[in-house]
Image: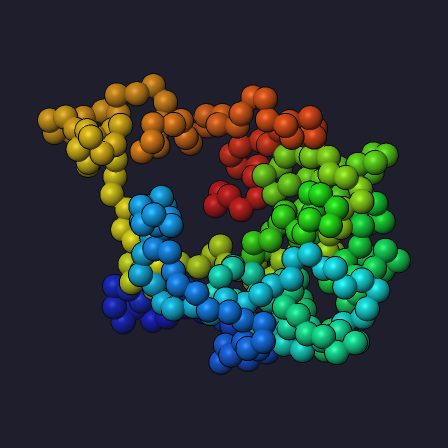
Amino acid sequence: MKKYKPTSAGRRGMTVISYGEYLTSTKNTPWKPLTKGGRSTGGRNSAGRRTNFYRGGGNKRTYRNVDFVYDKKDVPAKVETVEYDPFRSGFIARVLFKDGERRYVLAPKGWKQGDEFVVSESAKAKTGNRLALANIPVGTLVFNVELKPGAGARLARSAGSYVEVVAQDGAYTLLKMPSTEIRRVPATCWATVGTVSNEEYRLVSLGKAGRARYRGLRPKTRGSARNAVDHPYGGGEGRAPRGHKRARTIQGRSTGKGQKTRRPKKHSNRLIVSRRKPGKLMRGSSK
């Protein structure tokens, strides 16, 4: 983590990741055949209506086609470069398969140029290798975990995240999520051994509002500062209390403050062995 001298109010407390320690090159020039362009939505849907608030602007970005399906099995691959991806918090790696094909994959912690990996049922449980959950020893940390066989990775894809294999139970594997929830996942699903790179991402302090605008994040207005027509907390003379028993979103739905928002009859409830423990026990907490 890089810090700066407090030459201004924005520099005071600002922190930046030392990309030179982790990336093959800091010039950030992706391999063109694996990229595509596109316009930013600015938080608006196809009708032009705002569906994600406080988004807009930001630097122009080139999308990298990252492989989350890993359908090339039993073909060894070598890491050519470890690169920055503006669309995700973890680093990505450009890999060259033995048959000559190149792909982008999510890089695990510790990967560097020249490292090798393989996607195979018979692969060893070493960092970067991908294999079925049934073949992964208990206690191993994994990421890029599938929820349905062949559907592609869904769990543990952000910087520094991982899932722990805690038990093998017949046709299912028990996984401990970053939220401390323990969940059953079909043992035929695949996962990558290791943890996602760039674990220092959550320690970054933006330091100034401008860095948030570079990311396409706009200022947020408190609900209590709005008019009654615009938010459940709005209106009133002076500083009025919330006026609701439970915290609410702009649409009026319950949120946050320890309230349960999960649907009681959600289809995947049967797969949850132990619900998450909110608070300090959750990984990633600042305390």
From this view, report whether residue 124 is shown above or below residue 230. below
Q: Quadrant of residue 148?
A: top right
- Residue 143 drawn at (x, y percent): 67, 52
Q: Residue 182: horizontal and vertical position, in percent?
A: 68, 34
Q: What colour scheme was applied to this rendering of the protein?
A: rainbow
- Farthest residue toward the top? 245
Above or below, 152 against 206 in this view is above
Q: Is residue 76 left or right of residue 92?
A: right
Picture layout, residue 235 above or below residue 140: above
Q: Nearer the viewer, residue 222 or 60?
A: 60
Say which residue appears at 46% left-offset and 25% top-offset. Answer: 259
Image-quadrant location for residue 78: bottom right
Q: Quadrant of residue 186?
A: top right
Residue at (80, 62) in percent of width and height: 73
How many numbered dots are placed on residues in this image? 0
Q: Is residue 28 visible?
A: yes
- In the picture, measured across the screen, residue 187 lies left or right of residue 164, that is right
Residue lying at 36% horizontally and 67% vertically, measured from the top left = 59
Nearer the observer, 48 or 203: 48
Front residue of 166/169: it is 169
Q: Residue at x 29, y 58 (%)?
A: 209
Q: Is residue 50 above or below residue 259?
A: below
Could you tell me if residue 21 is visible in this image?
no
Of residue 23 and residue 131, the one placed in the foreground of this image is: 131
Q: Position of residue 11 (x, y in %)?
A: 31, 67
Q: Indicate left or right for 162 with 187 as reference.
A: left
Q: Residue furthest front?
A: 47
Horizontal and vertical percent for residue 149?
75, 46
